[in-house]
Image (cartoon, helix red, strand yellow):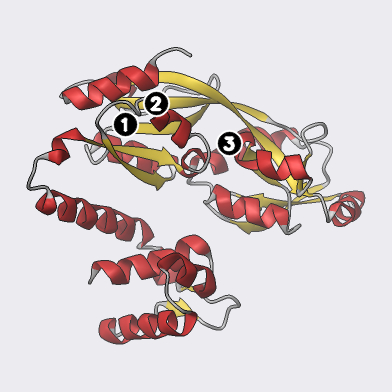
Amino acid sequence: MRLEWIEDILAVAEHGSFQAACEKRNVSQPAFSRRIRQIEKALGVTLFDRSARPARLAAHVTDHLERMRDLSAGLRDLALALRDTGGTRRRRIVIASQHAIAATLTPEIVARYADLDVHTRLRSANRDDCLAQLMTRRADIALIHDVAGAERLPGADFMDIVQIGTETLIPVYSGEHLDMLNAAYTQGELPVIAYPSDVFLGQVQRRIIFPRLTRVGRIRPRLETALTLAALEFARSGSGVAWIPEHLARADLRVGRLVSLGSTLPQVSMNLIAARLNSGTPRIVQDVWDRIAAPG
């Protein structure tokens, strides 16, 4: 299995279609399609369900996505280490960030230590994967969301944890398709974009948000995705109501592409958390941590 094969497959998984993936990989769509067929021929297995529009990963491939992400990150780290003949790796840190934080707040957080001579490797993942990378020392610092007043994070006894900001999970919907939502609501139905039950935001939906929807006759999940960026896109298209971190939805709200339904549907306050292991910390990680964790 070659690194470029893994990254081609991941590009389709993360961007939803061959067309979006080939743009990300900077190749033409015919060339990208040929590459995918060559991968399938070499492995002797069909990787994509082409009967769907757009084509999507076959179910047996989806089961291995996290392993492929780990392999991709590990191989890239190895390549960087082998090229590091001058010792610059000693001035390098790895930050594991939840997808929505990586897309919005992480640049601001990284700017807090911009004057330090540090190369930052950013890995975007779901919350559990961020914590797993931290605990296995594949990441130096994790940036995650946590619900205010929730139970202690797993592993909190051997981690340093500090709140560095706040966030609100808000219900949003397409500003252009409100009539569709009103028609469904009149019939006692609320179309929603759901997160899987095994990811953090899926647990927030099922434990906090959905039980508060007492005035809704029926909650109708239109589709399910673990990616907040994908949920955002589906909300824009009018597929259903999505609960999105406010920072991620702010630009769309400003121009009316999305509208907030927070006055009628539940919102959830969250904390922005930075975490690290509390032992064996390299000096450079300590310096970065001091900047990130500093008040204000």
Between circles 3 and 1, the one closer to the viewer is: 1
Q: Which mark is residue 274?
A: 2
- Cα separation, mark 1 vs mark 2, equals 7 Å
Who is closer to the viewer here, 194 or 211? 194
Give the mark, 3 or 1, whose residue is nearer the N terminus. 1
- Cα separation, mark 2 vs mark 3, equals 19 Å
SS at badge 3 = helix
Residue that appears at 76% across and 37% down: 213
Callout 1: 10 Å neighbours few (<14), some, many (20+)? many
Callout 2: 10 Å neighbours few (<14), some, many (20+)? many
Q: Are marks 1 and 2 in contact (CB under 8 Å)?
A: yes
Name the amino acid type tagged 2: Ala
Residue that appears at 49% across and 38% down: 101
- Cα separation, mark 3 vs mark 1, equals 23 Å
Who is closer to the viewer here, 118 or 292? 118
Q: Residue 281 placed where, x, y %?
A: 19, 24
Residue that appears at 55% across and 21% down: 148
Q: Residue furthest front?
A: 115
Name which quarter of the figure residue 153 lies in.
Answer: top left
SS at badge 1 = strand
Name the amino acid type tagged 3: Val
Residue 137 placement, left or right of 252: left
Q: Residue 58 placed where, x, y %?
A: 45, 74
* Residue designated by label 3: 204
* Residue designated by label 1: 141
